[in-house]
Amino acid sequence: MNVLDVRRIPGDRTSFFSDDTVKSIFYDIVESLENAGEGSALPMLKSVRLALGILASGKSSLDGFSGVDTQVL
């Protein structure tokens, strides 16, 4: 799937990221956190917050995937 795919969401919003792109971003961040040193963990955690914020805001059609619950936000 192309990273630049745009998906229409019910209503008048447009997602800038496809579901597969959001999943890929999230999994890359989690993998990086597993291998991160102390100094780089905080910026990556901020990226996790951003990715989960995209899911929770409705800008992606994902309501949760593979055990990720956006209700924790």
Image (spheres, helix red, strand yellow):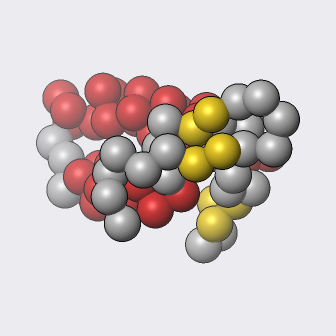
Does the rendering let one see residue 22?
Answer: no
45 sits left or right of 32 in the view: right
46 sits left or right of 41 in the view: right
38 sits left or right of 59 in the view: left
Task: Work out whether residue 29 or residue 57 is closer to the camera in this orientation and state it.
Answer: 57
Relative to 13, residue 31 above or below: below
Residue positioned 49% across, 52% down in the render: 18
The part of the image, by quadrant, that contains residue 52 is: top right
Residue 41: x, y in percent?
A: 28, 36
Residue 22: x, y in percent?
A: 47, 51
Residue 61: x, y in percent?
A: 69, 52
Task: Work out whether residue 35 or residue 8 is closer to the camera in this orientation and state it.
Answer: 8
For this orientation, the residue located farthest to the bottom is 66
For this orientation, the residue located farthest to the right is 11
The total number of labels drawn is: 0
The quarter of the image holding the C terminus is top right
Relative to 21, residue 8 above or below: above
Residue positioned 66% across, 45% down in the render: 8
Task: Work out whether residue 10 or residue 27 is closer to the camera in this orientation and state it.
Answer: 10
The quarter of the image holding the N terminus is bottom left
Does the rendering let one see residue 3?
Answer: yes
Residue positioned 77% across, 29% down in the render: 12
Relative to 14, residue 1 above or below: below
Relative to 16, residue 21 above or below: below
